[in-house]
Amino acid sequence: MLTRYALLFLSAAVLTAFFTFVVKRLAEKLGVLDCPDGVRKQQAQPVPLLGGAAIFAAFFALLYFSRTVVTAGNLDNRHWLGLFVGALILMIGGYLDDRYRLSPGRQIIFPVAAALAVIIGGVDIEKISNPFGGFIYFDHWQWPLFTWSEATVYFTVASDIFIFLWLLGMMYTTKLLDGLDGLVAGLSGIGALLIFLFTLTAKYYQPDVGWAALILAGCCAGFLVFNWHPAKIFLGEGGSLLGGFLLGVLAVISGGKIAIALLVMGLPILDAAWTIIRRLAAGQNPFRFADREHLHFRLLALGLSVPRSVLVFYSLGLFFGLAGLLMQSVGKLLALSLLLLIMLGAIFGFHFLKKQNK
């Protein structure tokens, strides 16, 4: 079994690396490049975009050839089709934005449509663990919408709203996080690997979801061959959204275990939330205005190199993700509280250093 999983991971990595090489050449020919601007984009020369297309192609190619495995459990073709359509929407929107620089108002159309595609595909969440005991149920107030593949798709108010907001939050977290080489791909891969391990546990055994999660982890590893500093290709708009999208969906369908993804991406989520609050307080559009106030840029300002700054995020994501894997509900709540304290400490610490340097 371990050999089978190792071959799957390696196949995903090799296939993604091959597709990344192809996409890199294509982006160069099309002129879809990220050019230095001296502020946020400080690479030495233009770097090809559209890297997310390589992860998309490899992930869904392997998912298709593994369809007998990924449809052997509670998930069927309509769930995976909803995921595919959502990801395809992100790729189309990402290409348009990378090529034509869409306004934030137009950019958001694609993440919204992607989240809706997943919900229409029948992905739902029945309950999540209550850290204080028992469960919080999301299956109240539901109405049938239509029948698809001999199954009825329901509009479940709490579940659908939760999934919609969760996926939007995850997508915009990885979008705002995509500022350092290898950061989004690496954290997405760590999250996917931990979800894979979670689905192997006796209590939550889900080989279909675990198979998909391991494919994603391998895809992220293969992309890092070209995306590690100094990056030869960037994820692009679609790719930066795709990481959060796929990880968010896998977290939902793996028994509604949101905690693992939340803890792996906890610091970036808090950083994204603080960025939005800070920009709104300054009267700025949080998605139009770009700056170097993100936590990962602050680490660079302290003198850390890009690889070391990225490894700080990897280490925290892995540590807190393992906490989500091994701890019970109360322990996970404590881990989230610790993450919040770390973020608050970073905010006040960097603010103090900024004032000292003036």
Image (cartoon, rainbow, N blue to C red):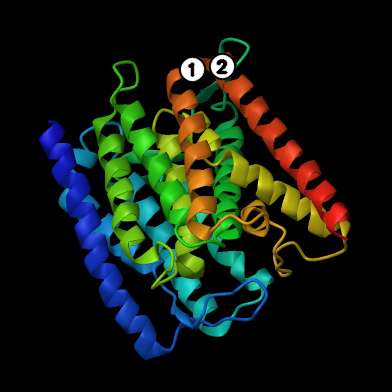
- The tag on residue 327 is 1
- The tag on residue 191 is none
Q: Quadrant of the N terminus?
A: top left
Do labels 2 and 1 touch, CB within 8 Å?
Answer: yes
Residue occupied by mark 2: 331
Q: Nearer the viewer, residue 239 or 307?
A: 307
Q: Is residue 328 above or below residue 69?
A: above
**Left or right, residue 89 beside residue 208:** right
At mark 1, the secondary structure is: loop
Mark 1 residue type = Met
Q: Nearer the viewer, residue 108 or 327?
A: 327
Query: Percent position (x, y) of residue 358?
Result: 88, 61
Q: Residue at x 60, y 48 (%)?
A: 169
Q: Residues within 10 Å of mark 1 (few under 14, many from 20)?
A: some
Residue 165 visible somewhere in the drawing: no
Q: Nearer the viewer, residue 166 or 292?
A: 292
Q: Residues within 10 Å of mark 2 (few under 14, many from 20)?
A: some
